[in-house]
Image (cartoon, helix red, strand yellow):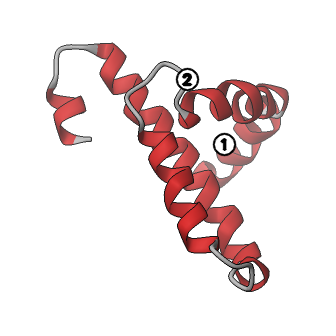
Amino acid sequence: SIKAIESSSKEEDTLWLTYWVLFGTFSIAEAFSDVFLFWFPCFYGGKCLFLLWCMAPVPWNGSQVLYQSIIRPCFLKHRRAMDGILGTLGTR
């Protein structure tokens, strides 16, 4: 991430920021579901493969695919409500 920030290429910055948004979303979801999911065989192996797919330096990597198809539409749908909540929190 530091190399992406220090690079002159904006494309690389966007790639890593997209990964970190997906990783944060995944971490929040995992915090609630980990109690049930760790019972599944190979859960941690699958989680590792999933995160490798999200970091893969290919055009169809997981972070781009999942961000464009799930996270971005959800964010755009609820953008105004989120801005309102953040504005209220900022004034407190």
Work out whether residue 92 can be spotted.
Answer: no
Foreground pick, 80 / 54? 54
Q: Which residue is mark 1?
A: 87
Question: For this rendering, which residue is in front, 36 or 88?
Answer: 36
What residue did someone put label 2 on?
A: 60
Q: Percent from the top left, x then y, of residue 29?
A: 71, 63
Instruction: Say which amino acid is labelled 1.
Output: Gly
Q: Give the mark nearest the N terminus, 1 or 2.
A: 2
Identify which residue is drawn at 76% across, 74% down.
33
Residue under the point 43% across and 35% down:
17
Q: Quadrant of the N terminus?
A: top left
Q: Point out residue 28 in the picture as x, y percentages from the top left corner.
A: 65, 64
Against 87, residue 4 (above or below) is above
Q: Nearer the viewer, mark 1 or mark 2?
A: 2
Q: Is residue 16 above or below residue 22?
A: above
Residue pictured at 43% horizontal, 24% vertical: 58
In the image, residue 47 above or below residue 37: above
Residue 8 in the image: state x and y as whole percent.
17, 15
